[in-house]
Image (cartoon, helix red, strand yellow):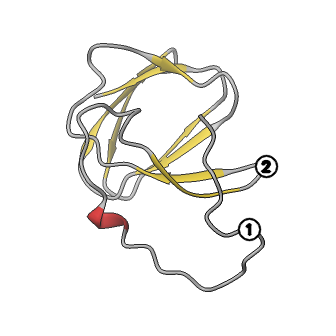
Amino acid sequence: MSPKAAIAKNLQCRSFLTFKTAPVDDFLKSRKVLLFNRDVYISVAAPKKSMTDYFYKNADADEVIFVHEGSGTFKSIYGQIEFEYGDYLVIPRGTIYQLE
């Protein structure tokens, strides 16, 4: 499902209170799109649980995840990579991964 623009062609300064994002159990369902265009989707997420039940692959786009809070392990064909507050996870398109 694609996001819908609330206000088309409107350039204004904005402040988003992203730490007030409602937590959701599932990692993928917790993603909320804030800004988008034809090339980029910028989302926030507050997952309550790890992705231990499944692996995920974004076949359409690369992903960049910035970790604002917490820590964990990124598991993929590249191995297990530990991450924590302040880290960026750069995930190439088509990579099958799991966040714990």
Identify residue type, mark 2: Arg
| C-alpha span from label 2 to label 1 | 13 Å
Name the image quarter holding residue 44. bottom left
For residue 38, the mark is 2
Identify residue type, mark 1: Ala
The residue lying toward the viewer, choosing from 11 and 63, is 11
> In which quadrant is the C terminus drawn?
top left
The residue lying toward the viewer, choosing from 71 and 27, is 27
Q: Where does label 1 land, which residue? A: 8
Residue 20 in percent (x, y) is at: 27, 65
The local secondary structure at tag 2 comes to: loop
Q: Is residue 58 left or right of residue 21?
A: right
Name the image quarter holding residue 22. bottom left
The residue lying toward the viewer, choosing from 71 and 36, is 36
Report the residue at 43% width, 44% height from top: 31
Q: Name above or below for residue 76 compared with residue 36.
A: above
Report the residue at 59% width, 39% height from top: 63
For label 2, the crowd category at 10 Å Cα-Cα, with few meaning under 14, some 14 to 19 and many 20 or more, is few
> In which quadrant is the N terminus drawn?
top right
Q: Name above or below for residue 44 compared with residue 24.
A: below
Q: Name above or below for residue 58 compared with residue 19.
A: above
Name the image quarter holding residue 19. bottom left
Residue 24 in percent (x, y) is at: 26, 41
